[in-house]
Image (cartoon, rainbow, N blue to C red):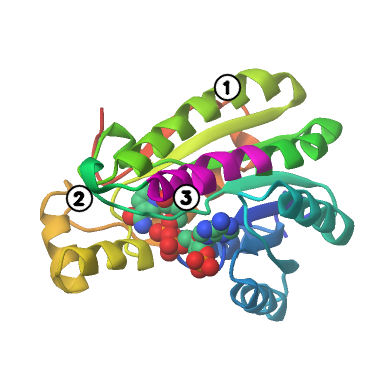
Amino acid sequence: MTESHSRVAIVTGAGRGIGATVAKRLAADGFAVALLDLNEDGVRQGAEAIVAGGGKAIGVGLDVSDAEQVDTAVTRVADELGPPTVLINNAGITRDNLLFKMTEQDWDSVLGVHLKGSFLMTRAAQKYMTEQGWGRIVNLSSVSALGNRGQVNYSAAKAGMQGFTKTLAIELGKFGVTANAIAPGFIATDMTAATAERVGMDFETFKKAAAEQIPVRRVGEPEDIAHLASFLVSEGAGFISGQVIYAAGGPRD
Ligand code: NAP
């Protein structure tokens, strides 16, 4: 067991993709992990796999944009695993379209999951962190925060995550709580597979084309993000707060 064996981490959107891999990594680091997702079966199975491997985990179904479901889920995590002092706000969706074709529903859904969801989750979890005098919040932003055609809703949400993160760092620092954002570039998950489908390319060709534009000449994998999340929630990362770290295989402005 590592230094973090007594700490409890919540990962949202842990049913698949980056969230599932981050949850697995934090469990391997010694955290008790609550996997939260819309897809309750998915997170139950993920939690069972962690438990079968000797870790401690539960899977909880919820919609992060629903305040009541969030409060119920976070209370359940505290009751079953102990006070959650690590929160990874990872749940996300895309509803891409050019501005002139984008519906109000596309806008509200994306802002609702990323921004409102992160706000609700963080508001519910901060109470445990401030009581414990220790906490780590990691928010998933994106290179799309810098602007991306067809993603006016998602870009706005991911830029919003950066301001949200910096303000959390300012407000919660005196309680021993850090907040940082990870801004991934292209990571191979169902989300990017769906983008490939939308533009009519097979995923392998899409990844190959993306890799050619990336300085390290490969696309990212969920493990790349899990590695950074693992560092940011570690004991030793307590003097790093309010930062946006681009994990994109190259520099970003
Ligand atoms: P993904 O494979 O699509 O997984 C997203 C997860 O979030 C799914 O398990 C989904 O549940 C869950 N989710 C969606 N809405 C939810 C809600 N309202 N409440 C609870 N859970 C919800 O996406 P990913 O690629 O792993 O992305 C994870 C995060 O990284 C997102 O915030 C994304 O914006 C960000 N990111 C990804 C990339 C990339 O290239 N992949 C790049 C930059 C940033 P269901 O399975 O039930 O739909």
Please, is residue 28 above or below residue 97 in the view? below
**Magenta segment:** 104-120
- Give the image location of residue 150, x and y in percent: 23, 46
Q: Secondary structure at mark 1?
A: helix
Of label 2 and label 1, which has the lower sequence position? 1
Quarter holding the N terminus? bottom right
Q: Residue at the location (16% across, 65% down)?
A: 206
- Give the image location of residue 39, x and y in percent: 59, 71
Q: Residue at the location (30% across, 41% down)?
A: 144
Q: Secondary structure at mark 3?
A: helix
Amino acid carrying mark 2 in the image = Val
Please identify the dominant SS of the magenta region.
Answer: helix
Amino acid carrying mark 1 in the image = Thr
- Residue, disc 1: 167
- Residue, disc 3: 109
Query: Label 3 neighbourhood size at 10 Å, few (<14), some (14-19), many (20+)?
Result: many
Q: Nearer the viewer, residue 22 or 12?
A: 12
Q: Residue furthest right?
A: 79
Quarter holding the C terminus? top left
Residue 107 relative to residue 101: left or right: right
- Hey, which quadrant is residue 22 in on the image? bottom right
Q: Secondary structure at mark 2?
A: loop
- Give the image location of residue 40, x and y in percent: 65, 72
Residue 97 relative to residue 15: left or right: left
Please, is residue 246 above or below residue 242 in the view? below
Asked if residue 72 can be seen in this view, the reply is yes
- Residue, disc 2: 216
Residue 116 shown in magenta: yes
Please, is residue 19 above or below residue 146 in the view? below
